[in-house]
Amino acid sequence: MFKELNPLLHSELRLGVMSILISADSADFTFIRKQTGATAGNLSVQLDKLSQAGYISIEKGYRGKVPRTTCRITEKGVSAFQEYVEALKSYIGKG
């Protein structure tokens, strides 16, 4: 029996962001953008969706005079990511 895939995480970019954050304490916007190859505008929209779902927290601040946006995965985000991985396993017979 197949488990339902979380549609919020099934997006390539949002899944990429979550994959980066699951293995890091935090990551800044520039790092995530470079790792995913996303445009700044698209990444901003996708981060907002993940934040609204409670999967990540976003902290805006400055490093010197340069604006900096830092993202962290939340406990809810970790759970959602783990459930997504388990659902994927059901499709490949590893669940």
Image: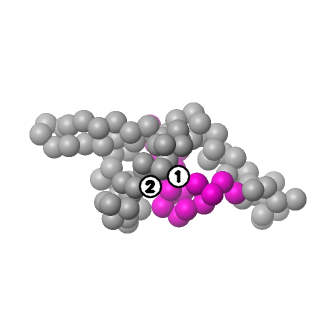
Give the magenta range: 5-26
Q: Residue furthest left?
A: 65
Q: Is residue 9 within the magenta segment?
A: yes
**Residue in the foreground of this view, choosing between 85 and 67:** 67
Above or below, comparing residue 49 to residue 79 in the picture: below
* Image-quadrant location for residue 35: bottom left
Q: Position of residue 81 (x, y in %)?
A: 62, 47
Left or right: where 11 falls relative to 24:
right
Check residue 46 in the rendering and tell me which mark sits there, or answer none: 2
| Residue located 57% across and 41% down the image | 77
Q: Residue furthest right?
A: 1
* Image-quadrant location for residue 45: bottom left
Q: Which mark's residue is nearer the viewer, 1 or 2?
A: 2
Residue designated by label 1: 19
| Residue located 37% across and 66% down the image | 37
Q: Mark 1 or mark 2: name the one nearer the start of the chain.
A: 1
**Residue in the foreground of this view, choosing between 12 and 92:** 12
Above or below, comparing residue 17 to residue 24 in the picture: below
Q: Secondary structure at mark 1?
A: helix
Left or right: where 13 falls relative to 76:
left
